[in-house]
Image (spheres, rainbow, N blue to C red):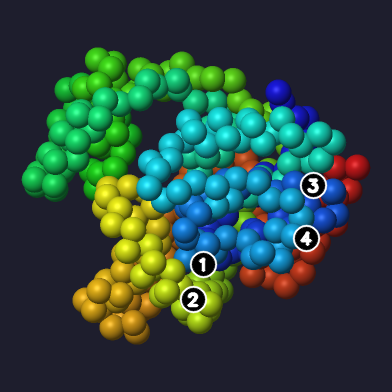
């Protein structure tokens, strides 16, 4: 099922996209649908900056905090959950917001129906990754998946492992699987598309303020409770921004101040990667500078008029 009216809002962490989504959903009688790969996890409300309880009460929110951190959540699973939420929208307008570019790509371009990877194959490549020198696994891709070899950064170990394990498990390269895609769930021709692109200095200051506020709001306690779960370090949730640093503080390996400083740096680096991805992958999406006073409210007014 495709909905001809939708709003898609992408942007780096702490850029103000959630505020825009909330105000639009209020104005449009909409439902906010999450497109952030870390905000799906139940145990990480504070550290992933999920919408507050008050925001969730003000406007319907879907696909937030509905997955245990112990689950290895995938893009394919996200699409299945999105499709289920989409069927329940009725007359409400979907306002899709998040910072995970792969989710937006999958929603608007479809996804390859890659079979699940065999558990033994996955374990084998994780062990190889732990023992290999930097760049070694990337070089192995060249013979079995040249397209992935040229496309992937040599340091993007997670996606390199994914390409290797898919080939090992299915006998078919990841690039070949990606050539055949499912139908998109969101029709770009009938959607308002926005990327929040704030001033870099403004964003850096906002990231630091927000992360320090997370600590005041119980972020360290949340990290301690999360660490007590004893999860596999390879799970996606273990890589949530701020989690490794605060886990180190909880274990006495870092002071809280040092953990916060390192987490702020990691968050800024992550935001830069997000901005690069959006710039390269979404060149025709409208840009809004949220660091300029009034831009968000002006965008709300303009979009509200377009959706009528």
Q: Position of residue 252 (x, y in %)?
A: 23, 79
The residue carrying mark 1 is 46
The residue carrying mark 3 is 30
Asked if the residue under mark 1 is in contact with the one under mark 3, i.e. CB atoms within 8 Å, the reply is no
292 or 116: nearer the eye? 116
Q: Nearer the viewer, mark 3 or mark 1?
A: 1
The residue positioned 25% from the left and 74% from the top of the image is: 251
The residue positioned 43% from the left and 40% from the top of the image is: 73
Disc 1: CA contacts within 10 A as few (<14), some (14-19) or many (>=20) = many
The residue carrying mark 2 is 218
Above or below, comparing residue 39 to residue 297 in the picture: above
Q: Position of residue 120 (x, y in %)?
A: 20, 29
Q: State the separation of the CA atoms marked 3 and 2.
A: 30 Å
The residue positioned 24% from the left and 15% from the top of the image is: 171
Asked if the residue under mark 2 is in contact with the one under mark 1, i.e. CB atoms within 8 Å, the reply is yes
Whichever of callouts 3 and 2 sits on the residue coming sooner in the sequence is 3
The residue carrying mark 4 is 58
Q: State the separation of the CA atoms marked 1 and 4.
A: 19 Å
């Amino acid at each position: 099922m495709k909905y001809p009216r939708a709003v898609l809002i992408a942007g780096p962490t702490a850029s103000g996209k959630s505020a825009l989504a909330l105000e639009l959903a209020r104005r449009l009688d909409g439902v906010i649908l999450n497109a952030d790969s870390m905000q799906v996890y139940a145990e990480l409300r504070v550290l992933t900056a999920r919408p507050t309880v008050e925001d969730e009460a003000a406007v319907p929110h879907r696909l937030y905090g509905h997955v245990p951190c112990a689950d290895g959540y995938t893009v394919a699973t996200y699409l299945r959950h999105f499709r289920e939420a989409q069927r329940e929208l009725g007359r409400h307008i979907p306002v899709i917001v998040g910072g995970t570019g792969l989710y937006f790509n999958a929603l608007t371009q479809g996804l390859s129906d890659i079979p699940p990877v065999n558990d033994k194959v996955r374990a084998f490549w994780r062990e190889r990754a732990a023992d290999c020198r930097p760049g070694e696994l990337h070089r192995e891709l060249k013979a079995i998946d040249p397209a992935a070899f040229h496309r992937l950064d040599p340091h993007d170990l997670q996606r390199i492992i994914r390409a290797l394990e898919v080939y090992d498990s299915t006998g078919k390269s990841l690039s070949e699987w990606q050539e055949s895609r499912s139908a998109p769930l969101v029709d770009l021709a009938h959607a308002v598309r926005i990327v929040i692109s704030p001033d870099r200095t403004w964003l850096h200051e906002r990231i630091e303020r927000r992360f320090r506020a997370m600590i005041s709001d119980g972020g360290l306690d949340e990290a301690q409770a999360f660490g007590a779960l004893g999860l596999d370090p390879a799970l996606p949730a273990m890589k949530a921004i701020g989690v490794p640093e605060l886990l180190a503080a909880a274990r006495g390996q870092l002071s809280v101040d040092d953990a916060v400083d390192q987490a702020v740096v990691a968050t800024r680096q992550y935001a830069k990667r997000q901005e690069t991805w959006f710039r390269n992958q979404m060149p025709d999406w409208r840009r809004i500078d949220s660091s300029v006073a009034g831009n968000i409210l002006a965008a709300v007014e303009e979009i509200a008029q377009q959706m009528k």
